[in-house]
Amino acid sequence: MVDDCNLGCTFLLLLFKNNRRCDCWNRTSRCTSNAKGIVVGAELARDVVACPGADTCNIAITQSRGLAKAIGDELEEQGLAEVGGVRINISGCTNSCGQHHAADIGLFGVERRAHGESVPGYQLLLGGHVADEQIRFGAKALRVPARTAPEAVARVVRRFAEERSAAETFPVWLDRVGGASAVAEGLADLDTIPTPDEDGSFYVDFDETGPFTVSVSESECAT
Ligand code: SF4
């Protein structure tokens, strides 16, 4: 269901069982909509949208909110936060509460294994798109450890900002440059996981203090 809010954003309303309001979090603080769904029409790169993730969701793999903040910080630092026309959505697991599959840049949480340890990671998808009568799911690009995901997103946003022609949308740009797999080639160096002794931060998720573990329990989510 596509609707508009009072600020002119476009929303995809994902209605949940029992008509419950989703507890999703987003950085679009300007939005005052009371919609029972998830904002997917944020207009600037800094407006990263994430599901609750491991903060409150029992079946989450990763801290999607923590990654959303880290991506926002990285974009601000690299001067890319104001890039328009690119939507970034994150889910903390393969379920799509964060609408990662319908975003220009989508990520969902996965467990990676390296050097005998669990590592928080993300699958990056590119080119998801929702329009009035059209939907295209994002195509898989590559998997990266959580720690390098902000840089991966920043590189994609930078390429889009530098290479797009006037009025070219993200999906059109992506198709023109060869699709998700072609863009992934420029990110391959980010799929490197050092040993715990070399960099222990790779083994701790964003907003966590202890080693990353996956402990999935019964879901309270609508999925
Ligand atoms: S079940 Fe939904 S809310 Fe929970 S982590 Fe997965 S995508 Fe996020």
Image (tube, rainbow, N blue to C red):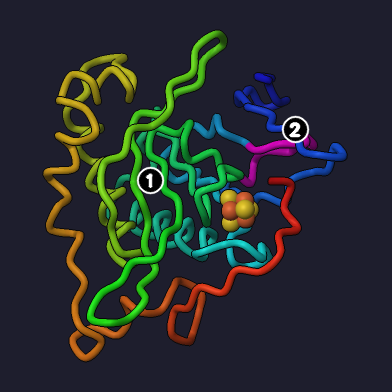
In the picture of the structure, the residue carrying the numbered disc 1 is 81
- Using residue 185 as the reference point, say whether residue 150 is left or right of it: right
Q: Is residue 37 above or below residue 72?
A: above
Q: Main secondary structure of the magenta part?
A: loop
Q: Amino acid at mark 2?
A: Leu
34 in magenta: yes
Q: Which residues are magenta?
A: 28-38
Q: Nearer the viewer, residue 195 or 38?
A: 195
Q: Secondary structure at mark 1?
A: loop
- Using residue 164 as the reference point, say whether residue 69 is left or right of it: right
Q: Position of residue 147 (x, y in %)?
A: 32, 67
- Using residue 170 as the reference point, say whether residue 199 is left or right of it: left
Disc 2 to disc 1, C-alpha distance: 30 Å
Question: Who's the residue at 52% across and 56% down the image?
Answer: 92
Q: Is residue 172 above or below residue 212?
A: above
Q: Position of residue 65 (x, y in %)?
A: 54, 60
42 in magenta: no
In the picture of the structure, the residue carrying the numbered disc 2 is 15
Q: Is residue 190 visible?
A: yes
